[in-house]
Image: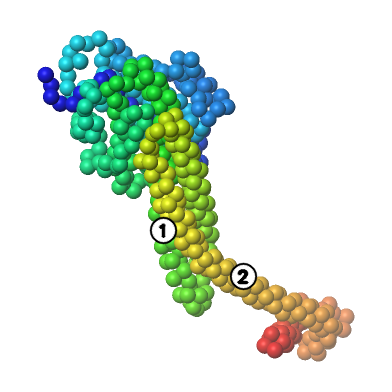
Amino acid sequence: MNSSPQLIYPTVDLFLYDLVDGLGQSNEQIQENRRRFWQRIYQDSLSDQKLAELQDAEILFSSYIELLGVEKIERFKYPLDGYYYPVKLGDTYALQIDCSGKENEPDWEQLSLEDKLRQIKDIIVEHTHEIPGEMGENWLVLGKLATDNQDPKATAQACYNALQLIPHAKWQRQGTFQGATCFELKQTDTIPDGLNRNHYILICLFPYDTTDTELKDIMGRLYKNLIRLFHYRNKVLWNYEQSHQLKRELKDSSRVIQKLVNALPDRLHASPLNLDELQQDLAHALSISHYYETSLGYLQEQASNLEINTQNYTKRVDAIAQLDPNSDLGFLKDFGEMATEKFLSHIHSDYQTLKAGLNPLETCIKTIAGIIEIEKTKNERTLNQTVAIASVGISTASLAASALTEQAEGIVKSILPVPANQPTPALNHWASFSLIFGLSVLIGIVSALITWRILDIRRKR
């Protein structure tokens, strides 16, 4: 006779949650999410045609869709007593993997509770096909105590030791539901990778005098509520973990912002100003600003989603409590209170702190843009002044050339006289042209210099 604790019809369930479509994902990525979810059930037999048929079930307008239709579940191969139960909960895929051991095998009943649970866990893990829940995972252990004086806590401890799912788990305070004693075990995620890796086990041990019919009815209602409850719990933790990821990225960006701001004085005091470098800094600052503001928007969205999911979680706990007015589900309510008091307040605080990081960047952008505009205006004014001076000089030279034509010919004739009745030699023509050109250019230059001086005096006033 085995002296270790026993359970009648011990059952283990794993609830896995995956995103249907992540933020900004393409249609190809969404299709890959769908394929990844269904590969747990169908593995290599998941054809494109089968995937298309499964996708059609998602079109229904409902927040709770049983993805296998009237069949509801996909059973394990005999003699395994287990099944898959896939559903779509809004924007999330949820999969319940249930197992109670093996059917019609006498040797199975002779195993100790620890051996049964170890084998059940291995069966479930094997049926995940090493595809973890992207958004989160939860374990549930159910069973009926084998004797009327059996210690529920000692039995729960035996279940925990046998499953070996969470090393050094924290045992939260216990509660009750429909006569069952419930134990909550969890371990906080310590890996900062943006994924929800929080571990969670709920153990519910029903009293010995619970009938099989009562147990079946209770479990049926409990499953439908827990799959939603765990969904909201995981979404809260997912939102919080995503906010941490955004916070880390924003802090990295703030360091880049500070470096850019610190370099600005040296840029402005450089002589002469390097407009190319300033324009590169402006482009860089505008790019960082766009990314920073977008990430802040995502952070605010995570806060809003976390608040909504916390409210939904609390409502679901209340719905479960209504199934048994004598229940004690304080241990479940604690999570909702913590999410509001800790998670939500942290995100709001982080948002306000990180939002202030935009101020020096905005000042930097305005300063650089202003300096570039001033330098451009200076360059345009200088160009306009040069054009004006050149125009005066050219106009004056042209007028002078026209006015000097007759005088130049007379001067050349006096210097190089031409005998009567003789054609004017080419030398005289070239001499006249050279004299006209030289005098007109000289007059144009003098006029341009006078114009430059007048404009310079006006600019200094």
Q: Which residue is drawn at 31% across and 33% down?
A: 182
Q: Quadrant of residue 174?
A: top left
Task: Report whether residue 338 is seen.
Answer: yes
**Rendering colour mode:** rainbow
Q: Quadrant of residue 83?
A: top left
Looking at the rendered structure, which numbered label has been put on residue 382? none
Q: Where is residue 245 in the image (x, y as percent from the top left)?
A: 40, 50
Q: Where is residue 197 in the image (x, y as percent from the top left)?
A: 33, 41
Q: Mark 2 points at which residue?
A: 373
The reply to whether dot 2 and dot 1 touch (C-beta < 8 Å) is no
How packed mark 1 is, by other alpha carbons closer than 10 Å (few <14, some 14-19, many 20 or more), is some
Q: Residue at x 55, y 27 (%)?
A: 62
Which amino acid lies under the numbered mark 1 shown in the image of this protein? Lys
Marks 2 and 1 sit apart, C-alpha to C-alpha, by 31 Å
Q: Is mark 1 on a helix, strand or loop?
A: helix
How packed mark 2 is, by other alpha carbons closer than 10 Å (few <14, some 14-19, many 20 or more), is few
Q: Is mark 2 on a helix, strand or loop?
A: helix
Determine the residue located farthest toward the right in the rendered image. Answer: 421
Q: Along the line of sight, which residue is nearer the eye, 55 or 188?
A: 188
Looking at the rendered structure, which numbered label has been put on residue 251? 1
Quadrant including the C terminus: bottom right
Which amino acid lies under the numbered mark 2 shown in the image of this protein? Glu
Work out whether 428 lies above or below 142: below
Q: Along the line of sight, which residue is nearer the eye, 331 or 166?
A: 331
Q: Which residue is drawn at 42% across and 55% down?
A: 346
